[in-house]
Image (cartoon, grey):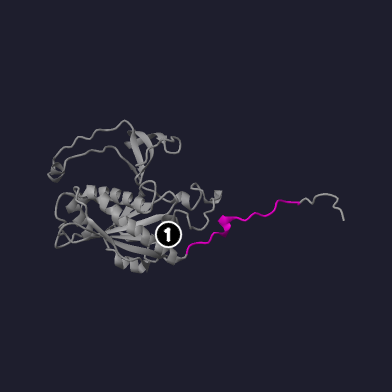
Amino acid sequence: MRSEGYLKAERALAQHSERLARRAPEPDELAALLVAAASRLEQALADDLAALLGGDRPQVSCGKVERAAAPRLHKMIDAVAVNWLFADAAGGELLVSLGLGGALALTDMVFGGPGAVPAVLPERLPKSTDLALARAADAVGIALGKALERDGSLALAARHDVLGKLVPARDEETFLTVRAQVAQGEAAPVDLLLVLRLSHAARVLAGGAVAAPVLKPTADYAATSEPFASVPLPLVAVLAEIKLPVRRITALKAGDIIALPMPRDVPLKLGTREIARGQAGSADGQMALRITSTGWTKKDMTNG
């Protein structure tokens, strides 16, 4: 029997989609990825904290990966602590917590001390720790970028002394945790607790390699739509940045005068990322900033 012609399909044949077939990683797989990242973090933290601690390379060791619910997390972290929230380009977040005693010890080491901690801890972190902790956050962000095999450092998205501002005590999600101990000389080790939401773990640890498919957001989920449009974000206008030697900083007292060179273009930052620049002036009787360029219109905007 001879065919009178070729058959023609009415519509295109279905194609197999790897994105749709890709499964989400299991919690045990994510924990294994965190173990591998923690191993790389030991080396990275030792390298990047060395410059902060006067060139002396500390000993860094990470403990085992554990799972914790939010109530347990609030018991593990001091009521007053340095809680850094780092974020990557994929939207994943990683919390790093440094206890009150550890923050004071690290500050002492940054300024050349042995890592001493007061016998009686203060109720809150003194302002004198801000400079040391800002530099420590930069070093930790760089180390995290290396440990997670990123092209650059993880950006600091937020910092709060109270954990509840970042993780509510009634948060229903499960978290992966791993503790990193930083030791130098005879000082007691400083503990850094890494906390990762299970829902963010695939993005942070695998960089999308084994993550569940990430769907392109629709207009309903744009930043200009609710509920995101009303979320307040802290912006910082950096009017002046100066460098002083340690001996000058430690000798500061009431009445001292420090010259602040005002830049022509003032950077406006969201966390550590520069999103705009402007000129300082006044409006309605108060200091103001007139935006001259933004990160969305100027492609070569420098990241902070």
Q: In which quarter of the image is the C terminus?
A: top left
The answer to whether residue 167 shows anywhere in this view is: no
Give whichever of 268, 30 is nearer the camera: 30
In the rendered image, the residue lying farthest to the right is 1
- Asked whether 295 falls inside the magenta stretch, the response is no
| Residue 154, position as x, y percentages in the image | 36, 49
Q: Residue at x 21, y 39 (%)?
A: 243
Instruction: Name which quarter of the figure residue 166 lies in.
Output: bottom left
Q: Is residue 249 left or right of residue 8?
A: left
Question: What secondary structure is the stretch in magenta mostly built from?
Answer: loop
In this rendering, is residue 190 above or below 282?
below
Q: Label 1 is placed on what type of residue?
A: Ala
Element under label 1?
A: helix
Residue of label 1: 201
Q: Which residue is drawn at 42% across and 37% down?
A: 294
The answer to whether residue 73 shows anywhere in this view is: yes
| Residue 74, position as x, y percentages in the image | 32, 66
Q: Is residue 116 left or right of residue 6?
A: left
In this rendering, is residue 153 above or below 257?
below
In the rendered image, the residue lying farthest to the front is 1
| Residue 264, position as x, y percentages in the image | 31, 30
Q: Residue at x 26, y 47 (%)?
A: 135
| Residue 266, position as x, y percentages in the image | 33, 35
- Asked whether 20 falls inside the magenta stretch, the response is yes
In this rendering, is residue 186 above or below 246?
below
Q: Give the range drawn in magenta.
A: 9-25
Instruction: Name which quarter of the figure residue 105 lies in.
Output: bottom left
